[in-house]
Image (cartoon, rainbow, N blue to C red):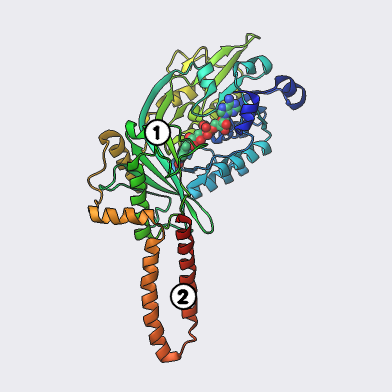
Amino acid sequence: MSTQESIANGLSGPIDWEFFLREQRKDRYDAVVIGGGPVGLWSAILTKVHCSSLSILIFEKRPVYLRTHTLSIEQESFEGYEKGINRDLDRVVTDLKQRRVVPIQTLEKQLLDLATKTGIQVIFANVNQPSDLLTHLPEATMFVGADGAQSTVRSQVFDNQARLNQTIHRLIQISYKIRQQDTRSFHLPSSETGFAYKTIASMNTTLIDERTNQKEDSTNKILTFTVSESVFGGVAGATFRSPFTLQTPTLPSEIKDDFLLWTGMKEETDGEVRILDSEAIVGIDGQARISKTFVKSVQGGDARPHYWFLVGDAAASFPLQRGFNVGIKCGIQLAKAIASYYANNSYPIATAQEGIEGQVPLPLAAYAAYGNKIKEEELCFLTCPLTKKQWGIALWKAATKLGSILPAIASLDSTTAERYRKNGKDPGHTAMAHIGAAQASMSAQRTAVAQQVGHSDGQHVTAQGKITELLSRYQAQQQKMG
Ligand SMILES: Cc1cc2nc3c(=O)[nH]c(=O)nc-3n(C[C@H](O)[C@H](O)[C@H](O)COP(=O)(O)OP(=O)(O)OC[C@H]3O[C@@H](n4cnc5c(N)ncnc54)[C@H](O)[C@@H]3O)c2cc1C
């Protein structure tokens, strides 16, 4: 990609080494992190707080964080985090644990601020040739590839060797908006507000129903469908940057059908009124990948060893729900390994073991040993104990192993399914039925109250105002549909 193309795509151009060394370099760096996404930032900050004398530099190719998905956070992911080592970081961790779900952008901005505050330098530039780092920053000893699932570091430094590399499933995600601020999780206890997992027999696919950002007058929703390879072919080219809509001609009819059924049902059962034309549809190739090597030693021009690491999605990526949590754990282990390396001057070299390449000192090899324990199951929902996740496990099993929907989950008769699909095509329709019922009961109430106290009852005025507002919303929607 040329520099102009990169910038047009919201990315920084490649590093201008001359400019960097002349104008931007602030120090002699000990560690360089490639990728300032959530895991790169987290790992760099932890390393810095464990070993404050280290000078750390991060390269991040996106000058502005634009991704919108949310991350669900699991308490267990922070096992091994040493509270009390840095107050600001403690606050971030407590906040993450309490919120349980956080928009990725919010987290990235928060961590970027903290990285800068702890003295880490961040440069917005694309490292398209990781080997250049050894040439231009020969003083650095540690190089960390935190550059995501399509890692350049992994492909150029680690030869892309994988312990696991498998398409587990193919997903179609539809993001859309509903009108009200809050939504109840379908058929789940009200404490489980973050997620609802549900499949029904009348649908063609399995799906996950997820609530994300809430605004004052709307809530973002994401439906994720697990689909066959042939259905997935229908969304070829639908990416986050260039999503399909419900009107895209190649969108498979079963997906459109199930989307209408689901949203129609949610309107009737939970009062969720979809905002027309708010849909963005993307295809996600559900490829799970775990690197074969996590630590590699490379001799620099000065005959000194330099160590390369992989962390986050670059080390182990899974296409749904767990990547960041696995990244949190790896970041904790990586920071400890680097800090313990700097705590002493010399260490024996680890004997040959899985996950390392070259002459790797023991404390750093410990990180690889941790990486070796990452299992396919850890990346899925299979080891999670909570009720909420058991739905995920069931869904996972159904979607990946059986390729069908769970028989235990409630089925719909075809007449009801058809009614839901009809609702789905005409959002607000059910709300209108409720209005009709409310009007009828209002009119009865009005008569009763009028008989008792006359026509000036304030309650009537308020309720009437609500009805008028709903009516005008519905009419506006009807006009939009032509
Ligand atoms: C829709 C969706 C929902 C998800 N939900 C969850 C969830 O609920 N819970 C969970 O744990 N995980 C979830 N994930 C996964 C999670 O987003 C990732 O695991 C996490 O973002 C990985 O962080 P990372 O920093 O390793 O990689 P990334 O987030 O991919 O960040 C890598 C960074 O490196 C930068 N970069 C890449 N190449 C270069 C280069 N050559 N030079 C400089 N910079 C570079 C990129 O710009 C990026 O900022 C979800 C993912 C998606 C897509």
Q: Quadrant of the C terminus?
A: bottom left
Q: CA distance from mark 2 to mark 1?
A: 50 Å
Give the camera-side residue of 308 and 318.
318
CB at disc 1 and ligand 1 closer than 8 Å: no
| Residue 153, image quadrant | top right
Q: Position of residue 464 (x, y in %)?
A: 47, 75
CB at disc 2 and ligand 1 closer than 8 Å: no
Q: Position of residue 439 (x, y in %)?
A: 39, 75
State left or right for residue 413 relative to residue 100.
left
State left or right for residue 462 relative to residue 303.
left
Name the kind of residue labelled 1 in the image: Leu
Query: The residue tagged with tag 1: helix, strand or loop?
Result: helix
Residue at position x 25%, y 43% from top?
406
> Seen from this angle, which residue lies furthest front?
482
Residue 395, above or below 4: below
Mark toward the viewer: 2 or 1: 2
Q: Position of residue 69 (x, y in %)?
A: 50, 42
Q: Residues within 10 Å of mark 1 (few under 14, many from 20)?
A: many
Residue at position x 29%, y 57% from top?
419
**Res. 40 in view:** no
Residue at position x 45%, y 71% from top?
467
Residue at position x 32%, y 34% from top?
228
Q: Quadrant of the N terminus?
A: top right
Q: Which residue is mark 1?
A: 379
Give the camera-side residue of 281 and 286.
281
Name the kind of residue labelled 2 in the image: Ala
Residue 277, above or below 470: above
Residue 407, above or below 475: above
Q: Residues within 10 Å of mark 2 (few under 14, many from 20)?
A: some
State left or right for residue 60 relative to residue 386.
right
**Res. 32 in view:** yes
Give the camera-side residue of 27 and 20.
20
